[in-house]
Image: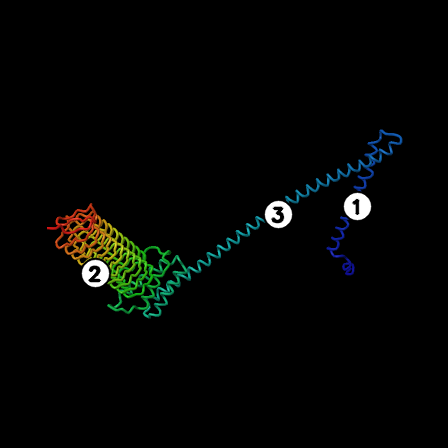
Amino acid sequence: MGEAAKEQPPPRRRSGIGIVIAVSAAGVAVVAVLTFLLWPLADLIAAHDVEHLAGPERGKELRVARDAARGRVIQVLAGVLALGGFVYTARTFNLARQQSELNRQTLELAMLQAREQTEATRRSLEQSENAQLTDRFMRAVDQLGNEAADIRLGGIHSLERIARDSPRDHPAVMEALAAFVRRTSQSRPGPVTQVPQDLQAAMTALVRRSADADQGRLRLHGARLDHLDLVGAKLAGADLTGAVLAGADLTAADLSGATLDDADLRGARLDGARLGGARLAGALLKAAGLPGADLAGAELGGADLRGANLRHARLADIRAVGARFAKADLTGADLVRADLTEAELNGAILRDAGLARAVLRRATLSGADAERLSAAGAVLAGAVASDICLTWADLSGCDLTDANLSGAELRQARLDGVDLTVVKLVGLDLTDAIAADGARVPSGWERLPDGRLTRRPS
């Protein structure tokens, strides 16, 4: 029994033999059918075609008819084969299309599952990351209250890293750092020029933050930031009301739109700083360095800029009612359309400055050096400008109603269109001043052919 079982061929071999037998049978059947079609059937068709013939012609025509019959049979077979090929091709194409659609659906399902898996993984990672960031944030905030300076510094640097890693947490980090700065700075003993290391580090993190991620302004009102290094600081729109920035280095800082009302900026360096649209009402800027600074459109009402360096600064459209610029250096400064009503500019340097269409009603400019000043169209009604140097200045079209120019130097100054009959002329020397025909010359003076003014001979 065991030997008989061993002699049985494996199932795979039996299957192969069956295929060979089936193929052989099919081949024999095909040969038989072809033989029948090309010989017996062709002979029958040919015999039928020549059955009406007799005699010697029948044999000749039978051969021709047999060949023709075989040709027709071959044509029919070719047509059947072609039709079968077409049906097979169409069937194959249809199956291939169905398989392609099935593959597409399978691929879409796989992609959908992969996306769902990826999204689930992302959510899991995000939740884990959020938990880690929350933990880091809480630990860093705790470090800010530590008595050890090194631990506070570590907390500051950790918070800055969190702000960089997580834009969503950026506003909370900046608020925490700003609160630390306000609290720490206000407890500084003063006046002390030594800056605490942790305060400087916190302010450095604040001023170099990514401002695009801000949600609201930095709140640093009342902070004591005197003598800090804030070069290139990004403080646009910050609230620095009443802040102390005396002696701070704000070179090239961006303070545009910031609120600095009543801030103390005495002796601060603001070279090339941007303060366009900032509020500086009542601010102390005495002896501050602002060369090349941009204060266009700033609010400077009541500000103290005595002795400040404003060389070539941009002050167009500022509102500086009652501001003090005594002995300030405004050489080459742009003060076009500035509102300097009742401003104090005694002893200021205004050489080559631009005050076109500026308003200086009741302003005081006694002893100012305004050589080559460009003030066409400015309003100086009621201004006191005694002993001012206006050599080569352009005062064309100015309103000098009740202005006091006693002792002023106006040699080669342009006075086109100016009404000099309303000016207080006590001690005023108009010799060599230039006035076109539109100007009104006071009594005792006459215009020479070249436009220069000279005293009328008595």
Name the foreground residue: 451 vs 330.
451
**Mark identifier at residue 28:** 1
Q: Name the residue beneath numbered marker 3.
A: 99
State the quadrant of the N terminus: bottom right
CA separation, marks 2 and 3?
Answer: 91 Å
CA separation, marks 2 and 1?
Answer: 124 Å
Residue type, mark 1 in image:
Val
Name the foreground residue: 208 vs 323.
323
For the residues labelled 2 and 1, say whether their Cβ atoms are less than 8 Å apart: no
Q: How was the colour assigned to the protein in this rendering?
A: rainbow
Q: Earlier in the sequence, mark 3 or mark 1?
A: 1
**Looking at the image, which residue is at 35% across and 70% down?**
150
**Mark identifier at residue 327:** 2
Q: Nearer the viewer, mark 2 or mark 1?
A: 2
| Residue 308 figure quarter | bottom left
Q: Position of residue 290 (x, y in %)?
A: 27, 60
- In the image, taking residue 120 as reference, residue 353 lies left or right, namely left
CA separation, marks 3 and 1?
Answer: 35 Å
| Residue 85 figure quarter | top right
- In the image, taking residue 65 as reference, residue 139 lies left or right, namely left
Residue type, mark 3 in image:
Gln
Q: Secondary structure at mark 1?
A: helix
Q: Secondary structure at mark 3?
A: helix
Q: Position of residue 192 (x, y in %)?
A: 25, 69
Q: Secondary structure at mark 2?
A: loop
Q: Earlier in the sequence, mark 2 or mark 1?
A: 1
Q: Earlier in the sequence, mark 2 or mark 3?
A: 3
Query: Label 1 crowding class (10 Å Cα cut-off): few <14, some 14-19, many 20+?
Result: few
Q: Is residue 49 above or below residue 340?
A: above
Looking at the image, the residue that sits furthest to the left is: 458
